[in-house]
Image: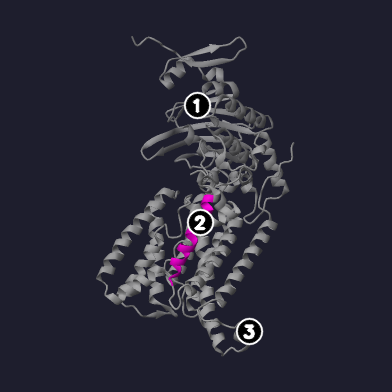
């Protein structure tokens, strides 16, 4: 199997603080990979490097064999879309305009969006259940609506790979599930997805593969069952945890509650 | 799937809006030529090129109108681009220190009585233009960090340099004699009461170049206004786009300020009025702001000439006194929430 996206020996540091040490992994076509790990373990930095938004200090990221460093930002954006954790839009853009901006890498410098671009944007909005918001101002939307609109803009890019940084943090249960339904549908239609996730149970429940980062290095990568073990999580998160299984095969990670142990 | 219209700019909307605003700018140019303390007969002006009417039209009023059209459109376009670059609706063309640099150049030329001319351009505009470009160069160099141009650093560097130059200007001003001081104060008020076509001709090439640069960046400007990371994720080379926006806006502002002095308010207010009327797409906003700004400054200059004859009010006073209340009215109507988006 040839990898669609290959991260090969990537290291990165902010000043003297080493953030990523010699990270290597590959993502195949149609994968759904979740990046998990404690705060500050390097998830966001690794995502940005994998999406070609930052250059690694050493190592290389290859997209279908070609180094990202050799591709223009525009060429990368036609194939990889990125949705950051938080986006503030300073000017009163309409929701439709924000989604249409996803067409940017496909249009010439002076081009106007045509009917096909509008069609792609409509489909992206339908997939994220945001069509009814098309005439609203982006700034007026709720957190969950904004996140769905930003995912719609990323989908309108028609990427092969969608990279998301904590797409469900700060969202309520209903919206968390809604975002994942959207992502799973896109994944079923062939989109490769890499997402950093805070919530281990969402990651285990929705993603086929997990990658656990610990202080900028890969602690484990594989199926949720294999990655999430009580001893490994206790070591990486420095917190005692339990795995609880349900009869239907689902399992959950919960911290070991020690109520009353303080006395 | 329900057929929901996705609102996007069409060529038709752009053409209709631009044509309408061009007509308005042409009408205000005509008003700028015909209105003034002295009544003129345009038929006589066209019929007799040596007559008094023709002299007033072609040697006094038309040069002012041309300068007003250039300065009004240039400042508005530069202000619009700087606001998108800094993602700050309170930014204007002078935010990044350019006017303090130009003012320093101007007061140096006045203080040391430089009267030389180089290629038909006087020492004052030349020195002030060079000082303005040097200033933006310093601001850019101070703010740039590797492959990034952090907006907050850019803003702080510009504002801090403005304060520093402001102090130097005050010091030189303090050492100046009465005549020099008066000339400097008049320069600082900003005016388009130019004599002849020389100033407009010397400012035009760089101004037009800067405007064309910004027009060609209309789509990246949309994405930059929505956020740097958002823009990068959609395929914009953010540092390159920021750099060209910065260079284009600086060329425009430096060219105008060196011949007109710092004319305030146009570069802040016209972009806002344009956004309130036409939304957030810079492909429409840039030409619209250029035409609205041109019409606005020419009309303000006409008011400056006829309000208290035979005196002329500095045009910067008129732009603020007319534009301020109108803008506050629009602000009331549109609600700050809509105007300032995520702020």
Q: Residue at x 37, y 72 (%)?
A: B186
**Circle 3 marks a residue in which chain?**
B
* Residue at (59% x, 55% y) in the render: B277
Q: Quick check: B200 left or right of A108?
A: left
Task: Check the residue under mark 1 and report the chain it is in.
Answer: A
* Marks 3 and 2, how far apart at CA: 37 Å
Q: What is the number of the mark on residue B43? A: 3
Label 3: element kind: helix
Task: Tell me whether marks 3 and 2 sit on the same chain.
Answer: yes
User: Is the residue A79 above or below the residue B256 in the image?
Assistant: above
Residue that badge 1 annotates: A198
Rendered position, A128 above or below B280:
above
Lateral position of residue B197 relative to residue A65, left or right: left
Viewer-proximal residue among A53 and B131: B131
Q: Which residue is mark 2?
A: B327
Subunit under mark 2:
B
Closer to the eye: label 1 or 2: 2
Check if mark 3 and mark 1 are on a common chain: no
In front of the other: A122 or B243: A122
Q: CA distance from mark 3 to mark 1?
A: 77 Å
Pinpoint residue B98: horizontal percent, then vertical percent: 41, 62
> Start and end of the magenta stretch?
B313-332
Q: Which mark is residue A157?
A: none
Q: Is residue B130 magenta?
A: no
The quarter in which the C terminus of chain A is drawn is top left
Q: Earlier in the sequence, mark 3 or mark 2?
A: 3
């Amino acid at each position: 199997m040839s990898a669609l996206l290959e991260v090969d020996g990537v290291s990165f540091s902010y000043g003297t603080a080493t953030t990523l040490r010699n990270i290597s992994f590959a993502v195949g076509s149609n994968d759904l990979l979740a990046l998990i790990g404690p705060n500050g373990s390097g998830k966001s930095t690794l995502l940005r490097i994998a999406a070609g938004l930052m250059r690694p200090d050493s190592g290389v990221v290859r997209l279908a064999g070609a180094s990202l460093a050799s591709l223009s930002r525009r060429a990368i954006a036609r194939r990889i879309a990125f949705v950051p954790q938080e986006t503030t839009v300073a000017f009163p853009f309409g929701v439709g305009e924000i989604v249409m901006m996803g067409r940017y890498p496909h249009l010439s410098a002076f081009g106007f969006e045509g009917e096909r671009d509008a069609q792609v944007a409509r489909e992206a909005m339908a997939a994220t259940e945001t069509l009814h918001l098309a005439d609203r101002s982006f700034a007026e939307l709720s957190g969950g609506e904004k996140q769905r609109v930003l995912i719609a803009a990323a989908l309108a890019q028609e990427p092969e790979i969608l990279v998301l940084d904590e797409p469900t943090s700060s969202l309520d249960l209903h919206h968390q599930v809604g975002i994942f339904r959207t992502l799973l549908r896109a994944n079923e239609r062939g989109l490769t997805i890499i997402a950093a996730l805070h919530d281990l149970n969402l990651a285990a429940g929705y993603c086929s593969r997990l990658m656990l980062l610990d202080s900028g290095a890969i602690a484990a990568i594989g199926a949720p069952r294999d990655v999430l073990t009580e001893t490994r999580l206790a070591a990486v998160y420095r917190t005692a945890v339990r795995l609880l299984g349900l009869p239907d095969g689902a399992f959950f990670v919960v911290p070991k509650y020690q109520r009353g142990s303080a006395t | 799937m329900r057929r929901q219209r996705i609102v996007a700019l069409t060529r038709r909307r752009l053409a209709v809006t631009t044509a309408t605003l061009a007509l308005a700018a042409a009408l205000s140019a005509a008003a700028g030529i015909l209105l003034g303390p002295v009544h003129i007969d345009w038929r006589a002006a066209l019929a007799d090129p040596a007559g008094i009417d023709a002299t007033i039209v072609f040697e006094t009023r038309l040069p002012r109108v041309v300068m007003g059209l250039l300065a009004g459109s240039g400042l508005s376009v530069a202000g619009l681009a700087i606001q998108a670059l800094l993602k700050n609706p309170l930014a204007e063309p002078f935010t990044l220190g350019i006017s303090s640099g130009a003012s320093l150049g101007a007061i140096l030329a006045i203080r040391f009585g430089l009267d030389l001319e180089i290629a038909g351009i006087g020492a004052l505009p030349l020195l002030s233009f060079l000082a303005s470009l040097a200033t933006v160069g310093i601001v850019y160099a101070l703010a740039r960090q590797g492959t990034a141009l952090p907006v907050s650093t850019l803003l702080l560097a510009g504002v801090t340099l403005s304060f520093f130059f402001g102090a130097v200007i005050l010091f030189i001003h303090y050492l100046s004699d009465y005549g020099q001081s008066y000339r400097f104060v008049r320069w600082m008020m900003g005016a388009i009461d130019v004599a002849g076509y020389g100033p407009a001709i010397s400012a035009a090439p760089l101004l037009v170049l800067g405007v064309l640069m910004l027009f060609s960046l209309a789509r990246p400007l949309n994405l930059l206004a929505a956020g740097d990371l958002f823009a990068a994720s959609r395929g914009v080379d953010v540092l390159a786009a920021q750099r060209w926006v910065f260079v284009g806006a600086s060329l425009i502002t430096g060219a105008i300020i060196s011949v007109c002095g710092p004319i305030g308010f146009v570069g802040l207010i016209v972009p806002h009025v344009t956004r309130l009327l036409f939304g957030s797409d810079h492909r429409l906003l840039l030409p619209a702001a250029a035409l609205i700004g041109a019409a606005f400054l020419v009309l303000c200059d006409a008011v400056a000439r006829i309000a208290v004859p035979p005196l002329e009010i500095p045009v910067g006073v008129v732009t603020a006194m007319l534009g301020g209340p109108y803008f506050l009215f629009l602000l009331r109507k549109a609600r700050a929430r809509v105007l300032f988006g995520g702020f």
